[in-house]
Image: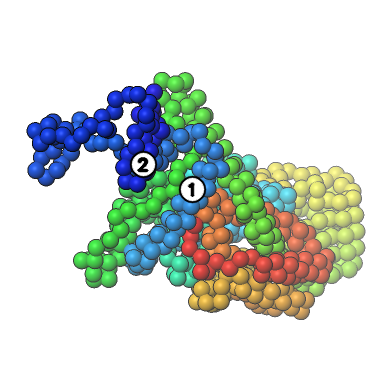
Amino acid sequence: DGYRNTNQVSDDYRYQDGNYEAPNDGYYRGGDEPAQEEDAQSDVTEGHDEDDEVYEGEYQGIPHPDDIKEKQKKRAPAVADEYRDRADLMAERMEDEEQLAHQYENIIEECGHGRFQWTLFFVLGLALMADGVEVFVVGFVLPSAEKDMCLSSSNKGMLGLIVYLGMMVGAVLLGGLADKLGRKQCLIISLAINAAFAFLSSFVQGYGFFLFCRLISGLGIGGTLPIVFAYFSEFLSREKRGEHLSWLCMFWMIGGIYASAMAWSIIPHYGWGFSMGTKYHFHSWRVFVLVCALPCIASLVALKFMPESPRFLLEIGKHDEAWMILKQVHDTNMRAKGEPERVFTVSYIKTPKQVDEFIEIQSSTGTWYQRWLVRITTTLKQVWDNVLYCLTAQYRMNTLMLAVVWFTMALSYYGLIVWFPDMIRYLQDEAYESRVKIFDEEEVSHFTFNFTLENQIHRNGEYRNDKFIGMKFKEVRFEDSLFEDCYFEDVRSSETFFENCTIISTVFYNTDLYEHKFINCRLINSTFMKEKEGCHIDFEEDNDFLIYLVSFLGSLSVLPGNIISALLMDKIGRIKMIGGSMLISAVCCFFLFFGNSESAMIGWQCLFCGASIAAWNALDVITVELYPTDKRATAFGILNGLCKFGAILGNSIFSSFVGITKVVPILLASSALVGGGLLALRLPETREQVLM
């Protein structure tokens, strides 16, 4: 009945030739009355004043049918949205988003590019720097941490991979949450997790707890990459986006340089620390872990003073907040340019239709953890829906092609980055073994050894009444030898073994010559007293200087590639940049067949890193531009998580061929790069595209 008035009017009255025609149904309607007298008209027009204003309750005549339809159209969405098909609502939202994309581009151009963007550039750059540092931390601390924690080869391998595993999960999870909770909020959560657990990992003593801390630390920092690029891109105009996102990538390089420099200056000073009793030790490598958390903490503090992305706020219908932030961007840039009188001319911004409605749970509904459980499960379901949306028909082909390109790039890049230092170490070991000294059938008696024996093989020797006091064996082997009435005291050893030896009436006091170092030996009347405490594993003596130098040069070598990609990104396009960079990197891989020395391997590593960085930068840019705002961080997180999975596979596969053959790693890396580069050429170009 409430709608009968308008329906009755539209049915009972027909508008013809400018006049209303009343139906002939026998009811009195007043339409056939003659013109009223002047006095009578005053009753009809009651409520009008001299300016012909309309008062409430005034009779205004029968409305025009077109006016009725217009009013119904305005009222219809508010009433009928819950009954409309979701596909219709999504179509309307897509239309709104397209209008918003073009309007937002014009607004960003009006705001200009200036002080605000550069401030945000450095704040987000610190977050990206923290991501770069995280990749190098474990590799630098392993040579020292393995001694403190007594790590076997398998434990070291797991510690190296656990960071990538955490980053893989963090990229997908936190990237998805950034499209629901906001860029700034999720980036703060990501950095806070990383800083807290990186700080904690420097103090824990046990391997299991340290492994757990690095896993959660990696999970936190894994979310920074997708959020940072989505966040910064939404403050950039189309003509600035490719260049300035490429400049932002330089902070990953700075992170690698920072980690290398800090490791070089801190870790060799083993005495930089303290001990509490015999169980708790805080050595220099732990100081290095603390120092590596500083970029993350600095970014976390600075981020508190930055606003949320206005593009994200518009997506969730928060028009006024977005308008205030855009006005802040405009005013900040105009003041910096010396034009404070410039007025922000935008008064209204299009907001997309809101399809997903949150229902706030009342405080009286259930217990607090039940309410939080509902909120968390609802949010995670929306994140999962976003993940599935990236595989719908509209985005499926682009997502699959990008996934292959990201994966092939990560497999070859991270695989070779691990393979290069391992190959250099292998070449060092070969050169070291070539200088071994061999002693056959030597006879030594009544002699005191109080100096280091290194890189020696003693065969068929006889040692009688000799003393080995306060000395060190390093890479020494005794084969088929006799020790009689000898005395070993305060002896340390590394990679030292006794094979098929006969040891008679010999005393071992305060040494680390444990049982496993005697292989097929006969021990007759020999005594082991007060063995050295600590780890029973022999560790390789790594050349720390060379490890830091290789990482430092590898990070520094990407500087020319970063500069070139930033300057050419908007000129030649993203697709040509990815394809060209990957194909050039593949060519560099073939030259690794000629890398038979340490200097040659370092040189080819620098060339490969410098050639491949342009592809990484272009991949970051095109991934941001191919997806709409409400799916951008989710898609970036999925692809970056796949990238970390490729890194795990690359590390495992390539390291297994060190010392066996160079053919498989080189062919695998080059073929992956060629395939990914050719496939990248089929992706759509996005440099002229506005952010949807």
Specify few, some or many for label 1: CA neighbours under 10 Å numbering under 14, 14-19, or 20 or more: some
Residue type beneath disc 1: Arg
Which quadrant would the N terminus be assigned to in this image?
Answer: top left
Q: Secondary structure at mark 2?
A: strand
Relative height, residue 622 to residue 48 (above, below): below
Q: Residue 264 at what x, y percent from top left?
A: 54, 65
Residue 679, located in which quarter of the rendered image? Answer: bottom right
Which dot marks residue 526? none
Q: Which residue is mark 2?
A: 15
Relative height, residue 77 to residue 492 (above, below): above
Determine the residue positioned at 23% across, 69% down.
Answer: 339
Q: Secondary structure at mark 1?
A: helix
Do tag 1 and tag 2 residues touch (Cβ < 8 Å)? no
Q: Which residue is mark 1?
A: 93
Determine the residue positioned at 20% across, 30% down.
Answer: 57
- Viewer-nearest residue: 565 or 553: 565
Q: Residue 440 at what x, y percent from top left?
A: 89, 68
Is residue 543 something that shows in the picture?
no
- Left of 70 or right of it: where is 394? right
Residue 76, located in which quarter of the rendered image? Answer: top left
Is residue 499 something that shows in the picture?
yes
- Left of 370 or right of it: where is 141? right
Residue type beneath disc 2: Tyr
Determine the residue positioned at 26% across, 32% down.
Answer: 32
Q: Nearer the viewer, mark 1 or mark 2?
A: 2
Determine the residue positioned at 32% across, 53% down.
Answer: 348
Q: Residue 95 at what x, y percent from top left?
A: 48, 52
Q: How many marks?
A: 2
Specify few, some or many for label 2: CA neighbours under 10 Å numbering under 14, 14-19, or 20 or more: some
Q: Residue 145 at what x, y percent from top left?
A: 61, 52
Query: Going from the N terminus, do you reach mark 1 or mark 2 first?
Result: 2
